[in-house]
Amino acid sequence: MGDERHGDPKHSGAVDPVGQGDVNQFTNPGLPPHPPRITDTNPQAEKRAERQVMVLFIISVIGTVLFFFGYFGVGHTGIEIGTKLRLQNTLIGLGTAFAMLGIGLGIIHWAKALMPDHETAESRHEIAPESQRAEAQEIIEQVLEESGMKRRKVLRNTLLGAAAIAPLPAIFMFRDLDRSQLGAHAMVDRLRHTMWSEGVRLVRDPSGLPIKASDVQLGSAFHVIPEGLNELHEGKLNEKAKAVVLLMRLPKDKMTVSPGRETWNVDGIVAYSKICTHVGCPVALYEQQTHHLLCPCHQSTFDLTQECKVIFGPAGHALPQLPIKMDDEGYLVAQSDFQEPVGPSYWERG
Amino acid sequence: MSQTTEYTPKTDVGRIANFVNQRTGAAAAVKEFGRKIFPDHWSFMFGEVALYSFIILLLSGTFLTFFFDPSMAETHYDGSYVPLRGIEMSVAYSSSLDISFDVRGGLFMRQVHHWAALLFVAGMSVHMLRVFFTGAFRRPRELNWVVGGVLLILGMAAGFTGYSLPDDLLSGNGLRIIDGVIKAIPVVGTYISFFLFGGEFPGTAIIGRLYVLHILLVPAIILLMVVLHLMMVVIHKHTQYPGPGRTEDNVVGFPVGPVYAAKAGGFFFVVFGAIAAIAALFQINPIWNYGPYDPSPVSAGTQPDWYIGWVDGALRLMPGVLGDFSFERNVAFPWGHNTFVFNVLLPALGPALFLLGLLFAWPWIERWITKDNREHHILDRPRNAPFRTAVGAAGVVFYCTMWAAASSDLIATHFHVSLNDVTYWLRTIFIIGPFIAFWITRRLCLSLQRKDRETVLHGREAGVIMMSPEGGYSEKHEQLNEYKRWRLVSFDTPQYIPAQPDEDGKITKKEKRRAKWSKFFLEDRVAPVTPAELAAAHDHHEVEGGDHKSLGH
């Protein structure tokens, strides 16, 4: 940076190139002698190369024809998708491939075999000659001086202030990307509520059939949604993304039940949120033997016998449990909504 | 303007060229580029692969936009694919199915677009590795290295926004993961998620929003960066590998017209042809098998596209709970409890920030450690910069471990090992792997350098066994010619520079730190053979012919 700069006719001294011609080093022998190619010396070889290039270009033409054969010859597949679509995709694709490869390889072969193959040297130039830099600096200083930026401090500072806050409206315009018209607190509060509430039946996903306690056998797992979800017209997926539940029966002796949750199961039948507490994939795999639930996305493993505590993987807390009971007709219903937010953790979860 | 001084062209080409030049001044551009020299090497073609893939992406992507409808409105599918008929789905998914089944060549274009996207990021990645390992990022090309890094990130962004568009089950789960990661960001994460999705996940806005990013904003910025990147290549002129006749002051290679233009232009068609062949023969992302997005089902063994794998793998490697300690921390603030989701934040941001930060900063880190502020136009052979090559290898192992972790479940099922063990092993490799890779690579580089010295000093093994009059056997060594020798001796390897006093004669703490790094990286060093050493070695051979003295250092 502050180094002294040495100029010579070739370099202004702004840049220090890597040293050359050091006495301790060998001298660059220069470009090696250029051996002629066979196409340079043998007219027959030259003719042959020319023919090869031509054949490659003709292959390209055949490829284009093949494309049209696939496009019009096979035609619309209609509902015979199986073999016809595959055939069409292969013909169109290989046709395009040959059309392109023929041209590409032909040109490259032409360049390598028939165009001059002498490597030549071109000298580099200094990217930023020192004289230019000095001139540019002078110009910038003159511009600054004439603009009065330095002298008129009040103008400069008020302009800076105005310019600093002027973009704020542009940022706040994005507020209505969420068009719920809710306040900040209510927006976040949505994450605490699902469709579940007292008396909502547990029904099968996707058929919507209600589940009797007697249907739930040891070792089986039900994918469950709240009754009425399928009939929603607005926001069905939003509700489903929070409300999906896994329902299983555990042998009573294998269950650990923490205080306050004693009445949340129906004779060993338990319901847990299916949304992984890591980043929200559905926890879809139930291992009957060990009573483990496994998330296929990042392999978080939850132990059903310990109220779905995390025993492996990246999830940070247990799957929320849905308190359930039996209604008068013997169907399983929810006692209430989840007692904590389902799905991935977030700042306001607390 | 007098008639006598005006140039009158004699050929048709000349007349057209003259017409254009008189109105645009294009002759200057022809003069600049027409015979500009470009050096030739196979490793310079990765960047070309990326550039050409990008062009193919623009072409195939434009075709797809004519048929794709980025709407999340509900519809019932009534296209040609019978198994999904009557199923409720979004218009986006339905139109993706139509492209696949009811637009002739639509499936092919979808496959070309997807394969080209994979190749685009792959081309950029390998190109950046080439640039790193050969030291092409050094002055004056640091800024172009940064532009390249930005391009890599933009390429991943383009890939991810596009991956989500068909609104099938697989891509929907990908979005769900993104939503979970965004929600983990302290203070603003929940709101960013709401704003992005237009309310709660999944909402009905995200596909349209990603579509605008994917087809307008991201490609426009990529295009801008590509232009910047190539302009700087023109300003700097291309680097070249060391070789006879090549110096820091010249470029040795082929002129653009006709040889380089023909080769590079032809290579575009080769890349296009290769992608077309892959798209013709290998199915990718068969969205009709996955079904429309539904928050409930998920299929096991799903993989992200390869370039997102490392981030997904990092998410998998992180333990959420260790014993009774959860990385999800609820912290009491005066206004209430808030949650730090470290088990998501750390793996999602940590490795990426570390790796990309190091990548962007490396040209300056290396310059600081080596105190080498000279311009470099001749590339390093990777072995001749053992410290840099070792750091690069450590980075590759770090990246690849996370990448492998994204397939931990497939590794487990494929090799019939426990998934948990695979994760434990990968966690171990994640931490110690880079150090082992650093050490092994540095030793390998130094050994290869010593081998080069030996070859220069004693010649190459000729494969001829000679018997001496006494009955001893030895192998004949052939001396290298001066051109081959030049390749092995014409390098410049940085040396350890002890801490230097500054202008006030004091050695600053920063300088001491630099010296430590300098010692760590550069102390083990193999110098190139000097003419004097070569002469000595030749005398030595003539006198004794054996008994090597120790070399190096």
Image (spheres, rainbow, N blue to C red):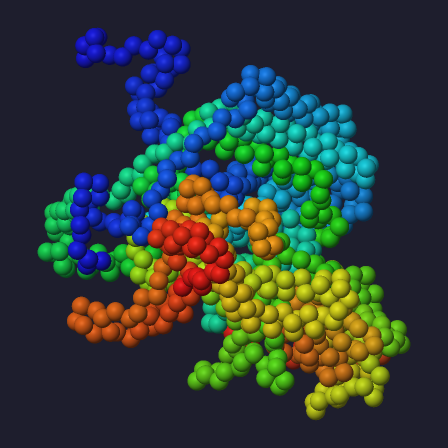
* Picture coordinates of residue B191, whole percent (x, y): 50, 66
Most extreme residue toward the front is: B469
- Location of residue A93 (image quadrant): top right
Q: Is residue B529 above or below residue A124?
A: below
Most extreme residue toward the bottom is: A259
User: What residue appears at the point 80 percent right and 34 percent down from the top-left corner?
Assistant: A84
* Picture coordinates of residue B118, whole percent (x, y): 59, 48
- Location of residue A264 (image quadrant): bottom right
Q: Is residue B467 above or below residue A204?
A: above
* Picture coordinates of residue B157, whole percent (x, y): 52, 53
- Note whether residue A217 is visible: yes
User: What residue appears at the point 78 percent right and 86 percent down from the top-left corner?
Assistant: A255
Instruction: Assign the C terminus of chain B to one quadrant of the image.
Output: bottom left
Instruction: Assign the N terminus of chain B to one quadrant of the image.
Output: top left
Q: Is residue B238 left or right of residue A215?
A: left
Q: B523 and A224: which one is in front?
A: B523
User: What residue appears at the point 35 percent right and 26 percent down from the top-left corner?
Assistant: B30
User: What residue appears at the point 24 percent right and 12 percent down from the top-left corner?
Assistant: B6
Label tally: 0
Q: B122 and B387: which one is in front?
A: B387
* Picture coordinates of residue B340, whole percent (x, y): 51, 76
- Note whether residue A194 is visible: no
Q: Is residue B446 above or below residue B228?
A: below
